Image (cartoon, grey):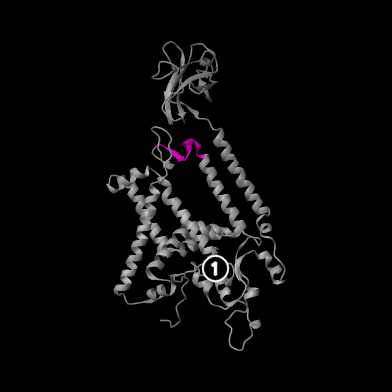
Amino acid sequence: MSDSPSAPSLYAAREPIYPRRVSGKFRYLKWGLLSLMLGLYYMTPWIRWDRGPALPDQAVLLDLANRRFYFFWIEIWPHEFYFVAGLLIMAGLGLFLFTSALGRVWCGYACPQTVWTDLFILVERWVEGDRNARLRLHRQKKLDFRKVRLRLTKWTAWLLISVATGGAWVFYFTDAPTLVLDILSLHVHPVAYMTIAVLTATTFLFGGFAREQICIYACPWPRIQAAMMDEDTITIGYREWRGEPRGKLRKGEGSEERGDCIDCMACVNVCPMGIDIRDGQQLACITCGLCIDACDDTMDKIGKPRGLIDYMALSDEAAERAGTAPKNIWKHILRPRTIFYTVLWALVGFGLVFALFIRADIDLTVAPVRNPTFVTLSDGSIRNTYDIRLRNKHGEVRPFKMSLVGDPALSIQLEGVATDTVDVPADTAHLQRVYVVAPKGSAPANAQASDLRFWIEDLDSGERAFRDSTFNGREN
């Protein structure tokens, strides 16, 4: 056997990160946003909104069973999915805009992975203590009663948060108060339990154990962000021209021989990603600003100016090294790239609002029955069949009168209805079968295809809508 050493492993085992507690403006901003977003997530399904009789009164509801999306006074039908697509486009453009202007502010302040990880770390700190206490517990090999008690307490709290997270999610898909009772009485569909279980497991694992691994390896955004950022993007950086050479001051050594950085490692100890921002821009950095708070606190203690670590733009480095004032922050934010994203974002938003206000409260779709394309009746006339879906978006029953425009020889008949008027229930898409007949020898009966237009009129409001189609005859 060869005595040569084995090849080094390309994978380094994960070292758990235990961030130290820190106070400061960015930490307080994160707490405020965390409270706001968690409050919105957990409380939104319980907000009520009166839409009238026979309609759900939950303000935000994804009613998959009835194929509706309710958002306060807005109701989205299946054929209006372009609203959802537009919102997704706006979300993407917004992410591009904020990343181009301010770096990974989404990742640092609003990403669900960041929010729930912050909450889990807070629970961990409450149960096990701050960074040093958690490190000692982690490095303790002996599994004594205290370690078991602390770990079980922490995991139980994490699990309760995870169950609440998964439970809150399913409340968005059906009436929340009713679903709570059904869950507790075990009368809910198994899909609800499965959804809660999956979301509970992922929240527990991602927020409690994977943490920074999700941001580094699972999320694609760190790799995409480079295309969104340039030298004018405001992001977190270390002013190495001011901080270097770093090191603690020793007796008899003048302060002019050292930079402002005293190598206290505070910025590293508070980082939830476990990186050293002094090494430069890194894929793992989520620009959460906690290193800024830690460094500013140290600068205050040693009597040095704040801002050794700060939000800055790389294009200001030369000016700062020369001791001159950098660009105004708005000159970094308002530049061609961000203006382009802003204009696109605004145009999509304006288009969605415009489409929302001009959409009709009644609508129809026409689907000709193709098997067979026409039927020859006993008197020689030609009949075509159509399935017409009538949509009544009002909160009460409305009478819809149906008519058609085309060759005068064509006549219309409604299946199951003696007249040309059908009552459409409130907030419903009613499927009505319609027959169009052309007498024997008429132009539509003898032509291969004739154009026609179906009209509906709401007899209560006078609103009208139409759809074009064709009548298939027997070609002679």
Q: Residue at x 35, y 58 (%)?
A: 160
Q: Is residue 105 part of the magenta span, yes or no? A: no
Q: Is residue 265 left or right of residue 371?
A: right
- How many C-alpha atoms fall within 10 Å of the one at disc 1: few (<14), some, or many (≥20)? many
What residue span does the magenta drawing correspond to?
66-81
Viewer-proximal residue among 120 and 90:
120
Picture quadrant of residue 259? bottom right
Instruction: Give the residue drawn at x 29%, y 73%.
Output: 145
278 above or below 395? below
Which quadrant: the N terminus? bottom left
Identified by mark 1, the residue type is Asp
Q: Secondary structure at mark 1?
A: helix
Above or below — where is 49 with respect to 208? above
Q: How far across and down, in percent of the image, does residue 170 sit?
A: 38, 47
463 or 86: nearer the viewer: 463
Is residue 77 located in the magenta-colored stretch of the structure? yes
Horizontally, residue 245 falls left or right of residue 467, namely right
Question: Visible in this render: residue 476?
Answer: no
Would you say residue 5 is visible in this rendering? yes
Q: Residue at x 48, y 22 (%)?
A: 460
Residue picked out by circle 1: 293
Q: Is residue 367 above or below residue 228?
A: above
Residue 26 at x, y percent in the picture: 54, 63
Q: Nearer the viewer, residue 441 or 257?
A: 257
Q: Residue at x 49, y 72 (%)?
A: 269
Q: Position of residue 389 (x, y in %)?
A: 45, 28
